[in-house]
C-alpha cells in the first residue's frame, strides 16, 4: 500500500519537479536580476512553501470568495445601501482608499508577476504568481464595490489617473515605485514583510472596522474577502526573510537594511491612514494611537523578539514612530484640511463630539496643541474666512509628505522637523531622521524623485493656476473643498429629507 504523504511533502512533489536546468542559455542570463543585489541563495529547495495550494485548489477557493462578494455587492446596490451610512462625509475615507490604496494593489500585482519571472526557485515562483493574481483581484473587487458610490458621490471617478499625478497620492505611489524599481529581493522584503507582515493591520483595521462602524457593508465584505488572501501574504512575508537570512550569513545585513528602510517608507504612507482613521471616519472604531500600540508596539515587539535568533532587530527609528503616535493624525489632517481645495475629497473642522473623542484618546496632546488650532479654524470659518493654504508646500524628498512633522522625539512638538543633505552641489530636504537616512544611503535614486510642487512650478502639470492643475488631475470643481456646502452633503441631505441645520438622520428608536 502506498504511504500517505503529509501536506508539505505532497506539495513539494507537486511543485519541485516543475523547474528544469536551462541548456540554451546560462542560468544567470535566464534569471538576470537574482544576484545583483548581493543576496546569496545557496539552495532554493530549502524554501518552505508558505501557501501550499495547488493551482487547481487556488482557483476553486478564489471563485468561491468572488461569488459571495459579488452577491453582497449586488444586493447593496439594489437596496441603495449607501443611504445607511453614518454620514456622506464617511465617503471621504473611501475616496482616499480607492485613489491611494487600490492602485497599490495593482502595483503589487505587477511587482509579484515580475518576481514570479525573476526568482529561479519554483516554490517562490508559484507563491509570487498566486499573490500576483490575488492583488489583481483586490484592485478589481475594490473598483467594482466602490463603483456604486461613484454613482452618488464625488471624487471617485478616475482614481488611477489621479494616482499617477496628484500631490497627496505621490506619497503612496512613490513608496511602491521605490520598491518596484528595486531588485526582486528588496521588493519582496519591502512589500511582503515590511508592509504586509509588519504594518498591514494598521491599514486594514481602520478601513474595514471603520467601514463596519459607519454602515458600509460593501466595503466590509471586500475587506474580508481580501483579508483571507492577506493571511497567505503575511506567511510569505515571514518566510522570505527567514529564508534569506538562513541561506547565507552575508544576507543578514542587506535584509536588515531593507527592513529599516521600508518600515519607515511604509510608516510614512500610513500617516494618511492615521488622519483618515481619527478625523475622516464619523465614527472611529479605535484611535491611531491605540492601533499603533496593539499592532506595532505589542505585536511587532513580540515578532522581533522571536526574530532575534536570526540576528534581526526592530527597524531603525521605530522609537520615533512610536513617539509620534500621539501627534501624527493631527499633523497630517491639518495639512489635508489646508489643501483640500486642491484635493478630490472634503475636509472639515472636527465636530464638537469628534473633538471630545480626540481629547479622550489623546489626553497628552490634543487639548494642549491641536484643539486650539481647530477652534481658531472654526472661528475663521464663522467669519467667512475658511482657511485654505494658497501656497505650494515643500515636500520631503523621500516620503513626499508636505513638511509638517515636528521634533516630537526631541521634546519640541511645535518645532518643524527638517533635515538637509547636500548632493552633487544641490540641497535636498527631508522630513525626519528616518527619511534623511534613506536619502543618504541612495542619494542618486531620490535626487530623481518626481515631486508634485516642483513639477507644477516647472509647468509640467497643466498650467500655472490651480484650476489648470486640477484639470490635469481630472478633478471636477465639486470634488474638493470643505464638506460643509459640498455637493456630497447636499445629495445626502436631499436623500434623507434633512434641513440646513441637520447633518445626520434621526436615529430611529
Ligand atoms: Fe492586496
Ligand atoms: Zn519624509
Image: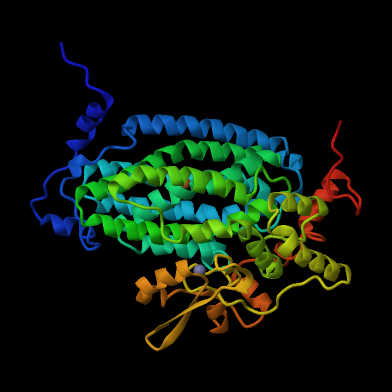
Question: Closest to the observer: 175 or 76?
Answer: 175
Question: Closest to the observer: 117 or 71?
Answer: 117
* Image quarter in which the N terminus is found: top left
Q: Is residue 204 above or below residue 37?
A: above
Q: Which residue is drawn at 61% across and 47% down?
A: 290
Would residue 240 appear left or right of 345 to someone viewing this image? left
- The residue most toward the bottom is 425
Q: Quadrant of residue 283?
A: top right
Would residue 508 appear left or right of 322 to someone viewing this image? right
Q: Position of residue 296 (x, y in %)?
A: 50, 48
Q: In this view, does 58 lie above or below 320?
A: above
Would residue 18 appear left or right of 498 to someone viewing this image? left
Q: In this view, does 123 lie above or below 462?
A: above
Q: Which residue is drawn at 56% across and 73% down?
A: 417
Q: Quadrant of residue 212?
A: top right
- The residue most toward the left is 23
Observer able to see residue 184? no
Q: Which residue is drawn at 62% across and 75% down?
A: 469
Q: Where is residue 38 in the image (x, y as percent from the top left)?
A: 22, 61
- The residue most toward the front is 411
* Image quarter in which the C terminus is found: top right
Q: In this view, does 66 lie above or below 26?
A: above
Question: Closest to the observer: 76 or 276?
Answer: 276
- The residue most toward the top is 1
The way the protein has been coloured in the rendering is: rainbow
Q: Where is residue 470 in the image (x, y as percent from the top left)?
A: 64, 71
Give the total number of marks visible in the rendering.
0
Question: Closest to the observer: 476 or 219?
Answer: 219
Q: In which quarter of the image is residue 11?
A: top left
Amino acid at each position: 500500500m502506498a504511504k500517505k504523504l503529509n501536506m508539505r511533502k505532497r506539495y513539494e512533489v507537486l511543485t519541485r519537479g516543475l523547474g528544469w536546468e536551462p541548456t540554451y542559455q546560462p542560468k544567470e542570463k535566464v534569471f538576470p536580476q537574482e544576484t545583483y543585489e548581493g543576496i546569496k541563495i545557496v539552495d532554493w529547495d530549502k524554501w518552505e512553501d508558505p501557501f501550499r495550494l495547488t493551482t487547481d485548489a487556488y482557483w476553486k477557493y478564489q471563485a468561491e470568495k468572488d461569488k459571495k462578494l459579488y452577491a453582497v455587492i449586488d444586493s447593496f446596490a439594489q437596496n441603495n445601501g449607501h443611504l445607511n451610512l453614518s454620514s456622506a462625509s464617511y465617503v471621504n475615507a473611501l475616496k482616499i482608499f480607492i485613489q491611494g490604496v487600490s492602485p497599490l494593489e495593482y502595483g503589487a500585482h505587477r511587482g509579484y508577476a515580475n518576481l514570479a519571472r525573476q526568482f529561479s526557485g519554483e516554490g517562490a515562483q508559484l507563491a509570487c504568481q498566486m499573490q500576483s493574481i490575488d492583488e489583481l483581484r483586490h484592485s478589481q473587487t475594490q473598483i467594482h464595490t466602490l463603483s456604486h458610490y461613484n454613482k452618488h458621490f464625488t471624487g471617485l471617478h478616475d482614481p488611477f489617473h489621479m494616482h499617477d499625478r496628484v500631490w497627496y497620492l505621490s506619497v503612496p505611489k512613490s513608496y511602491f515605485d521605490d520598491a518596484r524599481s528595486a531588485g526582486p529581493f528588496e521588493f519582496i522584503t519591502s512589500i511582503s514583510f515590511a508592509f504586509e507582515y509588519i504594518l498591514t493591520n494598521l491599514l486594514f483595521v481602520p478601513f474595514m472596522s471603520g467601514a463596519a462602524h459607519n454602515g458600509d457593508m460593501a466595503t466590509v465584505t471586500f475587506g474580508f474577502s481580501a483579508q483571507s488572501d492577506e493571511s497567505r501574504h503575511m506567511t510569505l512575508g515571514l518566510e522570505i526573510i527567514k529564508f534569506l537570512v538562513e541561506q547565507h550569513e552575508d544576507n543578514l545585513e542587506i535584509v536588515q537594511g531593507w527592513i529599516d528602510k521600508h518600515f519607515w517608507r511604509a510608516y510614512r504612507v500610513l500617516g494618511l491612514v492615521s488622519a483618515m482613521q481619527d478625523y475622516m471616519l464619523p465614527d472611529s472604531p479605535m484611535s491611531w494611537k491605540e492601533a499603533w500600540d496593539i499592532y506595532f508596539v505589542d505585536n511587532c515587539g513580540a515578532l522581533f523578539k522571536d526574530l532575534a535568533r536570526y540576528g534581526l532587530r526592530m527597524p531603525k527609528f521605530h522609537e520615533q514612530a512610536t513617539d509620534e503616535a500621539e501627534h501624527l493624525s493631527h499633523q497630517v489632517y491639518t495639512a489635508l484640511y489646508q489643501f483640500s481645495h486642491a484635493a478630490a475629497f472634503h475636509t472639515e473642522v472636527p465636530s464638537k463630539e469628534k473633538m471630545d473623542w480626540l481629547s479622550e484618546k489623546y489626553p497628552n496632546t490634543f487639548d494642549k496643541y491641536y484643539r486650539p488650532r481647530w477652534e481658531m479654524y472654526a472661528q475663521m470659518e464663522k467669519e467667512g474666512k475658511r482657511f485654505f493654504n494658497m501656497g505650494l508646500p515643500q515636500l520631503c524628498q523621500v516620503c513626499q509628505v508636505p513638511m509638517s512633522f515636528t521634533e516630537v522625539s526631541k521634546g519640541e512638538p511645535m518645532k518643524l522637523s527638517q533635515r538637509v543633505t547636500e548632493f552633487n552641489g544641490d540641497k535636498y530636504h527631508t522630513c525626519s531622521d528616518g527619511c534623511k537616512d534613506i536619502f543618504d544611503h541612495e542619494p542618486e535614486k531620490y535626487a530623481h524623485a518626481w515631486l508634485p510642487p516642483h513639477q507644477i512650478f516647472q509647468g509640467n502639470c497643466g498650467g500655472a493656476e490651480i484650476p489648470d492643475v486640477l484639470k490635469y488631475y481630472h478633478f471636477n470643481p465639486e470634488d474638493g473643498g470643505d464638506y460643509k456646502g459640498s455637493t456630497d452633503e447636499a445629495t445626502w441631505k436631499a436623500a434623507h429629507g434633512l434641513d440646513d441645520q441637520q447633518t445626520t438622520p434621526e436615529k430611529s428608536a
